[in-house]
Structure formats: structure tokens, C-alpha cells
Amino acid sequence: MNKKTLWIDTETTGIEPGKHGIIQLAALIDIAGEVVDEFELKFQPHPGAEINLEALAVTGTEPEELATRGTSVDAYFEFVRWLGKHINKYDRMDKAYPAAFNAHFDFQFLEAWFRLLGNNYGTGSYQNWKFQDPLALLRLLDYTGRLSLLDYKLGTACAHFGIELQAHDALSDVHAARLLHGLLIREVFNGK
């Protein structure tokens, strides 16, 4: 089966979708287990977005540097063009599985961003809403007593499983989350 998976990661100006904005977006299209394309862009948050300086510090972004980036509107259109290369938004059968580490966070931001920029359909033209999330698998392993970590952040899980990660860089995060997900699926379903 040639399942498509849309892996994303966002870096943001805070933790509230719509109120805060996306400043870095990375995405991978995985078809049948192989990455066929990737997307990565740093840009300004949407107009009117609140900027939390602590959130910028986490990503290593200086406010002055943020102001030199392209606009959120331009980034949106570039991302939608990229999605259109891999997913036919008019074909109900051609949708990707949305995937991310702590997917709820990233896809809420993505959905808010689409709607703020006038796309009333949101991300539903490109995804099937059957979220894939390595965090859920980590919690399952914890619940069954097969894993116990200090916390279940991406960095902690990657360190435990030997996956390279440059934390809070969206492209590094999205690659690490995808690798972690594959490893955890084997762990959960093969019982090793």
C-alpha cells in the first residue's frame, strides 16, 4: 500500500494557536515508508501575532533577525504549492496521514495559520485526520511498563533511542520524529 504521510514540525512565537504565530515550518512527504520530498522555511509570524521572547530564545531566533524574514503570507503560498505537488486537494482518496511529535500542537498551529490566511477549508484538503504521533506510542510503552523515561519530550526520547537531534530546529525535529515513530512501531508491535 502506498500510504502518504505528511510529517510536520513548527517553531512558534508562543503556545497558543492563532494568538501566536509560526516562524519555522518543516515538512516531509513519506510515501510507503520513503521520504520523497522535504520542505523547510523560516518566516515572520502572521500579522498581529503576539511574540513571546522566551519562545524565540528556545529556537535561537533574535527579534531583529525575525523581521528580515519573508512574510507569513508568502510562506503559506509556498507551502500550499509544495503540498499540491504531492497531494491532490480535490481527490478525496488522495490525502496524507498527518504526523508529528505531539501532533496536536503542530497541527493546531497549522490549522489556525491556514484559516487566518483565508483558507476556510484549513488543512483538510490535504490530510485525513488519522494522526500519527510517536508521543502516543511512548505513552503506550510507559503505560504497559515497557518504558520509563524522566519525561517524554522529543529530545529525551531521541537520546534514549540513539536518534540524532538538534532540538527546536523544525527540520531536525521532523526527521527525528519520523525515525522515532518507525522505531516505536516496531517496538510496540514486535514486542522487542
Image (cartoon, rainbow, N blue to C red):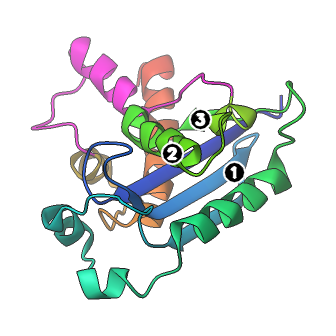
Residue 136 picture location, percent across and down: 37, 24
Marked residue nearer the N-terminal end (2 or 1): 1
Q: Which quadrant: the C terminus? A: top left
Q: Main secondary structure of the magenta part?
A: loop
Amino acid type of the residue tagged 3 in the rendering: Pro
Vertical arrangement, residue 185 with respect to residue 76, above or below? above
Q: Residue at x 50, y 29 (%)?
A: 186
Which residue was labeled with disc 2? Answer: 110
Marked residue nearer the N-terminal end (3 or 1): 1
Residue 18 picture location, percent across and down: 38, 45
Q: Nearer the viewer, mark 3 or mark 2?
A: 2
Which residue was labeled with disc 1? Answer: 29
* Quarter residue 22 falls in: bottom left
Secondary structure state at the residue bearing disc 3: strand
What's the CA distance linking mark 3 and mark 1?
10 Å
Q: Residues within 10 Å of mark 1 (few under 14, many from 20)?
A: many
Q: Which residues are magenta?
A: 128-153
Of 122 and 158, nearer the camera is 122
In this picture, residue 11 sits left or right of residue 29: left
**Mark linked to residue 80:** none
**Mark linked to residue 98:** 3
Outermost residue toward the top? 144
In this picture, residue 96 sits left or right of residue 130: right
* Quarter residue 145 falls in: top left
Vertical arrangement, residue 79 with respect to residue 120, above or below? below
Amino acid type of the residue tagged 1 in the rendering: Ile
Q: Is residue 62 visible?
A: no
Marked residue nearer the N-terminal end (3 or 2): 3
Secondary structure state at the residue bearing disc 2: helix
